[in-house]
Image (cartoon, grey):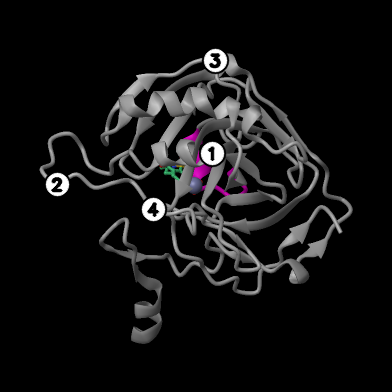
């Protein structure tokens, strides 16, 4: 029992303290083994309906930067895909590395990407608040999109231009009229989906993950601005670059990853 407890006690570079995973057998992220994924013809294309007017602010929470949306009504929604219910967009954020060689949380046949976008939604058919859905059954749906370094992403530039204003942990600036649909790949029919968890505390296993097969491209310089952010607040003496803000991969524990494509 002690060994098992030790196995679940992990030191994560980001959080410095051991993370007592609640005996989790549905933790995220994972490696997606393509040849072991199971095609499910019942999986529909994603149906996103985002209203840029619900975009409110962008802030540095000391772990990533979040673009937050007004989720007090069903204005920016996600349906379809593997989902039976309607989900509301509450925020999106990214994970990235200190180099282009790694940075994503999920991998595909062990392939790492330089960064990964997460669009976080909560089940507004079942819950009335995001906070309830976080620890509720079938509470969250997170779309994962891999980033590759290549041509400049025109839609991302407005976000990149806002980052210097939130260099330090705790800084917030107004950020409006940003349509997150511009960050989705052109193909929203092909994805993998599995039952998992948040990749940050509280690590609750309330997430239907939807990982897009097609990546998006951003330029080297755009990604470099992500790395200019800091984990630390303005008051701290030692400033630490916000890089490698990803969780290590977790055991599949017998879960099936389904694919919407053959
Ligand atoms: C009420 C406590 C919520 C804690 C989780 N918040 S979140 O928006 O779902 C989130 C998800 C994720 S993830 N990678 O999508 O699981 C990462 C960060 C955060 C965050 O809040 O910083
Ligand atoms: Zn994330």
Pointer 4 residue: 98
CA separation, marks 1 and 3? 22 Å
Q: Is residue 202 visible?
A: no
Q: Check whether the beta carbons of the residues at disc 3 and disc 2 lie within 8 A of each other.
A: no
Local secondary structure at mark 1: loop
Q: Check whether the beta carbons of the residues at disc 2 and disc 1 lie within 8 A of each other.
A: no
How many other residues sit within 10 Å of disc 3, few (<14), some (14-19) or many (≥20)?
few
Q: Nearer the viewer's eye, disc 2 or disc 1? A: 1
Pointer 3 residue: 177
Dot 1 or dot 4: first in sequence order is: 4
Q: Is residue 135 left or right of residue 34?
A: left
Range of the magenta residues? 130-140
Local secondary structure at mark 3: loop
Dot 3 or dot 2: first in sequence order is: 3
Q: Is residue 80 magenta?
A: no
Local secondary structure at mark 2: loop
- At x 71% / y 30%, what residue is drawn? 48
Dot 2 or dot 4: first in sequence order is: 4
Locate the N terminus by quadrant: bottom left
- At x 82% / y 49%, what residue is drawn? 43
Q: Is residue 88 left or right of residue 227?
A: right
Residue 51 image point, x, y percent: 63, 18
């Amino acid at each position: 029992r002690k060994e098992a407890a030790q196995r679940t006690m992990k030191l994560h570079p980001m959080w410095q303290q051991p993370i007592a995973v609640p005996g989790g057998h549905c933790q995220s992220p994972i490696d997606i083994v393509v040849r072991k994924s199971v095609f499910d013809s019942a999986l529909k294309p994603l149906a996103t309906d985002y209203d840029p007017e619900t975009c409110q602010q962008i802030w540095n929470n000391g772990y990533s930067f979040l673009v937050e949306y007004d989720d007090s009504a069903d204005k920016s929604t996600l349906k379809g895909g593997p989902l039976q219910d309607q989900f509301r967009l509450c925020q999106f954020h990214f994970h990235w590395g200190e180099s282009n060689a790694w940075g994503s949380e999920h991998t595909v046949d062990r392939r790492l990407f330089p960064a990964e976008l997460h669009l976080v939604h909560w089940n507004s058919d079942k819950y009335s608040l995001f906070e309830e859905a976080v620890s509720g059954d079938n509470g969250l749906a997170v779309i994962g999109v891999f980033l590759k370094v290549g041509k400049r992403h025109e839609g991302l530039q407005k976000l990149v231009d806002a980052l210097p204003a939130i260099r330090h942990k705790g800084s917030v600036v107004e950020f409006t009229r940003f349509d997150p649909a511009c960050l989705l790949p052109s193909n929203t029919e092909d994805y993998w989906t599995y039952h998992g968890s948040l990749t940050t505390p509280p690590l609750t296993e309330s997430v239907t993950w939807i990982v897009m097969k097609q990546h998006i491209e951003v330029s080297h310089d755009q990604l470099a601005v992500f790395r200019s952010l800091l984990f630390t607040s303005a008051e701290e003496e030692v400033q630490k670059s916000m890089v490698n803000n990803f969780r290590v991969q977790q055991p599949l524990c017998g879960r099936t990853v389904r694919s919407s494509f053959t």
